[in-house]
Amino acid sequence: DAGVTQSPTHLIKTRGQQVTLRCSPKSGHDTVSWYQQALGQGPQFIFQYYEEEERQRGNFPDRFSGHQFPNYSSELNVNALWLGDSALYLCASSLGLPGDNEQFFGPGTRLTVL
Amino acid sequence: QKEVEQDPGPLSVPEGAIVSLNCTYSNSAFQYFMWYRQYSRKGPELLMYTYSSGNKEDGRFTAQVDKSSKYISLFIRDSQPSDSATYLCAMSADWNSGYALNFGKGTSLLVTP
């Protein structure tokens, strides 16, 4: 049973460019959350997708957007990249049920912005 | 003040020692409490998951939650060099919040042979 998978593993971009990161949830999970982890910090919640809609959003600008597909996989898009966007981007999947909050993380995508 | 505070360490202990890790928080709406282990440049791995106050044990790991003090702990018994990693505490409020996780900065643990 595959866990949460993410692609690509690493990515290097320059300021002003746009990037798309991808996530496939754990089998049986229908909810995907995205987190940003800067070096030496804990992950910060970006947003969550459930039933193909953004259900909750953290304190991130509109440059960060996402999408969830009918098979529950998800994309994170970041526009107009700047140096501060360099981080490990983590995807977590869970069951979208009240009372069940176990979130399982993928290996992450390491984004470097030059 | 951050909602979740965690001493970043580093914490160095000899093999076989009992390790105590802890976090404090300020948001009384938090109901779900988790501990994740993260190896260098990898994704966090869920170790312990608890709801509300109380203790939970799983093998060498014990998680404690004291909501009255807004304090959570993770104990590791008979620590091994393979336990060397960063330990992240995380917590969330209810369903209406989307269960968004709020993390501490992580504590770096080194277990020496």
Image (cartoon, rainbow, N blue to C red):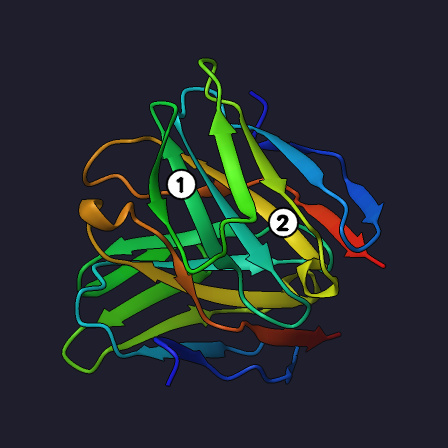
Q: Quadrant of the N terminus of chain A?
A: top right
The residue that mark 2 highlights is A89
Q: CA distance from mark 2 to mark 1?
A: 13 Å
Horizontal side of B92 relative to B11 (left or right) equals: left
Give how far across and how far down residue B93 sits, in percent: 23, 57
Q: Quadrant of residue B38?
A: bottom right
Horizontal side of B9 relative to B4 (left or right) equals: right
Q: Quadrant of the C terminus of chain A?
A: bottom right
Residue B15 visible in the shown view: no
Give how far across and how far down residue B60 sits, in percent: 46, 60
Horizontal side of B28 relative to A109 (left or right) equals: left
Name the residue rendered at 56%, 58% in the picture. Answer: B37
Q: Which mark is residue A48?
A: 1
Q: Label 2 lies in what chain?
A: A
Residue A103 visible in the shown view: yes
For residue B47, above or below residue B62: above
